[in-house]
């Protein structure tokens, strides 16, 4: 094993745990305990699906090249990562963080610096796509060993097939066995002394697996570079095969539907080529000729009447290739004396060649396995901007699925930001454990479906509020309508009340509580109310309280 490469962030004070459990600590990302003498990332696969993580990743990448699968992946990536010319695809949200404005400003600056190291504005689509297909993502956090307080100098992408995450037991199996024997017969949970687990990465720059065995064995591990846990950003899909202890991609459950679709399409092509043309059957009367002469006579007749004109696409010529015989040509059969003589019949082609119901079924099955609505297949359907009832339930499920992917993908930013803040002495590891739960990441939304959903929900709430208006003051209060039907929060109610009072004061909107003139239907003013044309009105040119009676035109025109 090569030397230890990288850096480690350790707590200065290590306190023994106060809570003791008989359950050993595990890892949620799928990597189990491996001994240093074992095969890292290798399995005995009876089913023949995969032997190593490298085989699994290569299969995922081959699947992503298939057109239908690539189209579904692009739908997912385009929904998760929105590329805008002005805004960044992701921003940090610190509204729930209980910290000073200075700390929040520094966190935002460092997060912007991390995005610049990743070149995330330009490469966001590629980064997310690689993470989604491989099911894992590795970045090497390069720092200046002489000046670690400068933070991360560079973030280098590492191919997933060249990295292995290893959780190794520090003690030897003999020492481990002795501890197990010493604990026999003890029922006290405090007696459980679990071995210390060491976590690190093995980087094999030569391409990973052994060229002869195809497995990540001892030789491959010895040639690799051992890298510390803190020097690598490790983000997984969250899907784990618990039987084998390996991390899976979101494409894993699509392996079988994709293979079925490819097999059905290939068989359909073969059937179309072999059964599509109509072929003729020639029954040639050979009389009483012996077998050898009869066969020779049949070949002579076949070559005489056979037409084999072929169009050469390279030269643009038409040539006669009578010496070649394909399986799609006509049939020539001999007939003895006593039969019906020479006869020509037609063998019909295959029926129902236009039926592709099975193809459509497996294509929809593939899309469903990728959590993509089948309505998005081949650009079918679309959003009806009329009623919310037109919104499919599959679109709701797809929106939630993309939200879960974004949440999981944000762990990459979380790890990089943690390292950057700790190295630059902005926060301590203990402070980060408290603050990390309140740091969120907002992705840019450009989903027309979300806008449609919000609009339709708003219209429905307004309609329900209008229906309940006659019952305000009798069965329901106005506050109940605003909170339960319109779904307004306390902050929104306060803001809207202030804005409405200001707009009424400025004269932008009329006061809804003012009395209405029954003749004109307009709100009545404070002076001159009642519709009396002879009522005195205030002269705008005078500053005092003098009332001037407006005279009507003479002549009785009114």
Image: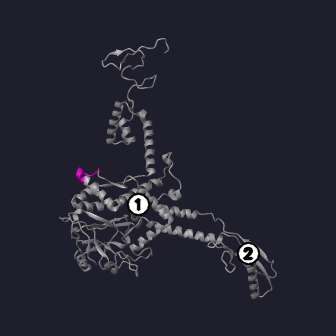
Between the residue at mark 1 and the residue at mark 2, the CA separation in whole angstroms equals: 59 Å
Q: Earlier in the sequence, mark 1 or mark 2?
A: 1
Identify the residue at horizontal 33%, vertical 18% (top origin): 542
- Residue at the front extreme of this rendering: 315
The secondary structure type at the circle numbered 2 is strand
Camera-nearest residue between 223 and 394: 223
**Above or below — where is 486 with respect to 76?**
above
**Residue 315 located within the stretch drawn in magenta:** no
**112 relative position to 346: left or right:** left
**46 relative position to 413: left or right:** right
The numbered dot on residue 406 is none
Residue 429 visible: yes
Camera-nearest residue between 469 and 24: 469
The numbered dot on residue 281 is 2
Give the label, 1 or 2, closer to the camera: 1
Camera-nearest residue between 541 and 199: 541
Magenta-colored segment: predominant secondary structure? loop
Magenta span:
95-103
**Above or below — where is 362 with respect to 451?**
below
Circle 1 residue: 125
**233 relative position to 313: left or right:** left
Crowd band around label 1 with a 10 angstrom C-alpha radius: few (<14), some (14–19), many (20+): some
């Amino acid at each position: 094993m090569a030397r230890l490469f990288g850096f480690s962030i350790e707590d200065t004070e290590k306190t023994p745990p106060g809570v003791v459990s008989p359950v050993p600590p595990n890892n949620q990302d799928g990597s189990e305990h491996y001994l240093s003498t074992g095969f890292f990332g290798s399995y005995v696969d009876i089913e023949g699906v995969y032997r190593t993580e490298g085989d699994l990743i290569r299969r995922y990448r081959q699947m992503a090249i298939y057109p239908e699968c690539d189209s579904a992946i692009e739908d997912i990536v385009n929904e998760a990562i929105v590329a805008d010319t002005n805004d960044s695809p992701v921003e940090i949200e610190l509204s729930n963080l209980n910290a000073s404005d200075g700390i929040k400003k520094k966190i935002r600056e460092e997060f912007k610096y991390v995005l610049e190291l990743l070149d995330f504005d330009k490469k966001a689509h590629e980064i997310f796509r690689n993470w989604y297909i491989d099911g894992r993502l590795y970045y090497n956090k390069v720092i200046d060993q002489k000046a670690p307080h400068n933070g991360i100098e560079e973030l280098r992408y590492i191919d997933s097939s060249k990295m292995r995450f290893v959780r190794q037991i520090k003690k030897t199996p003999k020492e481990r066995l002795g501890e197990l024997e010493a604990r026999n017969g003890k029922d006290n949970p405090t007696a459980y002394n679990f071995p210390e687990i060491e976590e690190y990465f093995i980087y094999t720059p030569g391409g990973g697996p052994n060229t002869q065995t195809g497995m990540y064995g001892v030789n491959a591990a010895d040639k690799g570079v051992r890298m510390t846990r803190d020097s690598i950003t490790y983000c997984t899909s969250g899907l784990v095969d618990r039987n084998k202890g390996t991390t899976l991609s979101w494409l894993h459950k699509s392996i079988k539907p994709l293979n079925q679709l490819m097999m059905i399409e290939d068989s359909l092509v073969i059937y179309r080529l072999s059964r599509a043309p109509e072929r003729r059957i020639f029954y040639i009367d050979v009389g009483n000729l012996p077998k050898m002469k009869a066969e020779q006579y049949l070949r002579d007749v076949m070559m005489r009447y056979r037409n084999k004109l072929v169009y050469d696409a390279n030269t643009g010529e038409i040539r006669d290739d009578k010496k070649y015989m394909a399986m799609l040509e006509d049939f020539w059969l001999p007939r003895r004396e006593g039969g019906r003589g020479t006869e020509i019949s037609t063998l019909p082609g295959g029926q129902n060649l236009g039926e592709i119901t099975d193809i459509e079924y497996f294509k929809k099955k593939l899309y469903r396995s990728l959590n993509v609505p089948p309505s998005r297949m081949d650009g079918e359907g679309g959003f009806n901007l009329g009623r919310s009832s037109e919104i499919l339930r599959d679109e709701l499920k797809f929106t939630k699925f993309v939200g879960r992917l974004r949440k999981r993908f944000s762990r990459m930013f979380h790890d990089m930001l943690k390292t950057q803040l700790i190295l630059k002495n902005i926060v301590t590891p203990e402070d980060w454990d408290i603050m990390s739960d309140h740091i969120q990441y907002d992705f840019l939304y450009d989903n027309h479906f979300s806008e449609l959903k919000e609009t339709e929900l708003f219209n429905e709430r307004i309609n329900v509020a209008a229906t309940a208006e006659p019952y305000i003051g009798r069965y329901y209060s106005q506050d109940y309508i605003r909170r339960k039907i319109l779904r307004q929060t306390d902050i929104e109610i306060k803001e809207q009340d202030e804005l409405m009072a200001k707009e009424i004061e400025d004269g932008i909107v009329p006061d809804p509580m003012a009395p209405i003139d029954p003749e004109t239907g307009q709100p009545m003013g404070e002076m001159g109310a009642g519709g009396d044309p002879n009522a005195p009105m205030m002269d705008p040119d005078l500053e005092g309280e003098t009332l001037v009676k407006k005279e009507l035109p003479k002549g009785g025109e009114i």
